[in-house]
Each structure stands twice: as C-alpha cells, then as structure tokens.
Amino acid sequence: MATPDNLDGIIITWGDRLFYPGNRVVKVRPSPRLSGDAARQRAAVIRQRIAATVVRRAPQVMVKVTGGGRGLRAIAAHFRYISKNGRLEIEDQRGEIMRGKDVLHDLAEEWRFSGSYIPDGAEPGHRRQAFNIMLSMPRGTDPLTVQRAAREFAQVELRDHKYIMVLHDHQANPHVHISVRAESTLGKRLNPRKSDLHRWRETFAEKLRGHGVDAEATRQATRGQHHRPDRLWRLKAREEGRLRTARSTKYREPRGHPSQAKATEAWLQLGHALAGSNESTDRELASHVFRFIGEIGARKGNEQSRVPVRRVDRQQQTSAPSLSGKAPLPLIVQPDDRAQAR
C-alpha cells in the first residue's frame, strides 16, 4: 500500500489534471514540490472534489456570456430586458438597490460618461462596450442564496468595473443577470476567454459552497460527458413557453475526444491510488470512482450502438415514399452552431 505522503502526491498530480486543467506547468529547476501540511491540505481539497463528482453528484453551476452591447442603445435595451422594464430590483457595484424606468435612463447616462465615451449607436468595427453574463443554478436552489453568491462573485471577478445585477426567480432555474461595462475604472478592458469562463465557474461554485450549497464547476470531460448544451435562446424560449418545436433528436456520432481519454486515465490513476490506501474512507471512495468509470464506459457504448440505427432511420425518412401518396414532410434540421458562428 502507498504511504500517506506518496498517496497525497499521486492525488495532487492526477487531481490537478482533472479539476484544474488550465494551470500552466512551468519547468524550473529544482522543481517546486508541495510537502507536509500544504500537500495534505491540497490532497484533502481534491478528495472533496472527487467525492462531489462521483458520490454526491453535486449540481453544476452555469456561467455564460450571453452577449454584449455595442452602443448605448443596445446597453440600455438590455437593462430594460433584465429588469423587466424597471419592475425588478437592480443592484449596482456599490450595492445600491434601485427600481423604476427613470432609474434605467439615469444608469445608461452614467455609463455613457464613466470612462471612454459610449455613443448611442454601434460604430463600424467597434468593440463591445458591455458584456452580459448569466449565472444560474438548477431548479430547487434557493434564489436568494444564488443572488448572494453572484454578488460575491462580481465583487471578486468584476472589481473596478461598473455593473448591475438582477435576480430572476420567476422561472424554473434561479439565475442572476449581470451587465458589466467592458472598460474598468482603471482603463483596462474585460475580454473573457475560455479560461476566464472556467475560473468564473469555479469562483461562483466556491461562493455557493460558502453559503452551504453543494455546487461544482467541473469540465464535461471530467464528468464523462460531451453533449452540446442548448443555446440560450432555446432555454429562454422553453422557460417562457414560446418553444414551438422540440430539439432535433438526431444523434451525432461523437468525435475523438482526447480530453476525455486523458480524463479517464486520470480517474483510473486516482482509483488505483485510493484503492491502495490504508484508510477505509479512501478505499470506499475508490469504489465510487471505479463505479463512475464504469458508467462512463456504459454511456459511451450506448451512444455508439445508436449510431447505425439513427442513420438508417434518417435514410428511410428521406427516401421512402409516403403511404398516403403525399410527399413526405421535410426534415427540420437545427442549424449547426459553428455554421452560425461563421
């Protein structure tokens, strides 16, 4: 069996690859190593995240950049949308609570002159002057707790920026809309990238856990998933009862996912390391890890088995004549997200 120090080292090495993949590895000599209390604390944190993923199956937070305003008219329109034309409470970066149509106009004018001037309309080739962010949790989460966690998130991640936030608790999933001015009071621009979004999810989950809410922010590959989530317009339309057609159920054959292969390898290494521990709690956690790996494999097998069936169904639907003598109805194919992006 592995000694406690060696075990903690293995957990840190493979746990970092699973839960903190964005960390850059800088090669220096001699290589820095965690030891003693620091290593034990780090390994304990990773054990907690393993348990949250494979035992408790903690709810995943959602943080999305839903768009951004170019020109004050677009920014003011988003203010009206998230506040329901001033009927909902608006909170700014100072913690001031406000409400009403007049407030929206005053806020927009304040943003116009807080830093670089924001014209009414979008100028050709001009960058966004604001970003729209949504922080959400699954149904059943206390909306006020989501609001408190979002407030603390903004104080950390959006400090030195002007922003407003509005809680939406009238829909299935409690969520907070944040509109943030892209240029900070120090003249620096917000430019969220993929790594920033992952950090934002981590921060939001951390703030929720601080309020007693079990929340995680793991990657899809770590969870053994690779589905593409619904786009924001579809989520909003479904919540408001405006979605007329169901999403296409056609199965798309999964592509190669090197990140998933690496995640599975990391889970296997962690499972074997925990199984060799002297602690019964570690060995019990290992059994959950191996069960989780088995579920990932079963899920992939089921997905692959559906591929030929779906292909045959599609061919039959597009080529077989209708029994009624009428031409078959055309397939309704959802536009590919990447094609839209182009």
Image: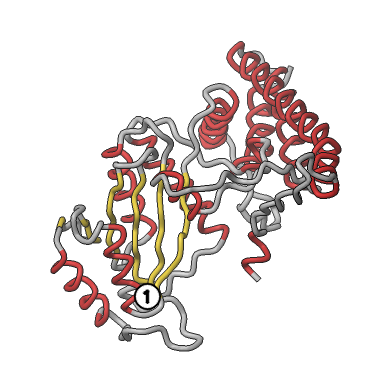
Identify the image quadrant of residue 24. bottom right
Residue at point 61% right, 52% down?
Answer: 23
Residue 17 in sight from this viewpoint:
no
Q: Quadrant of the C terminus?
A: bottom right
Relative to 279, does residue 327 appear above or below in the rendering? below
Residue at point 29% right, 81% down?
Answer: 115
Identify the image quadrant of residue 309. top right
The reply, left or right, for residue 196 in relation to residue 337 is: left
What count of labels does the image hold? 1
Residue 53 in sight from this viewpoint:
yes
For disc 1, the marked residue is 183
* Front residue (pair 239, 325): 325
User: What x and y, as percent, mark residue 222?
Assistant: 65, 38
User: What x and y, as percent, mark residue 249?
Assistant: 67, 41
* Front residue (pair 212, 99): 99
* Front residue (pair 56, 316): 316
Residue at point 38% right, 38% down?
Answer: 172
User: What x and y, as percent, mark residue 169?
Assistant: 29, 42
The reply, left or right, for residue 218 in relation to residue 316 is: left
- What SS does tag 1 mark? loop
Residue type marked 1: Glu
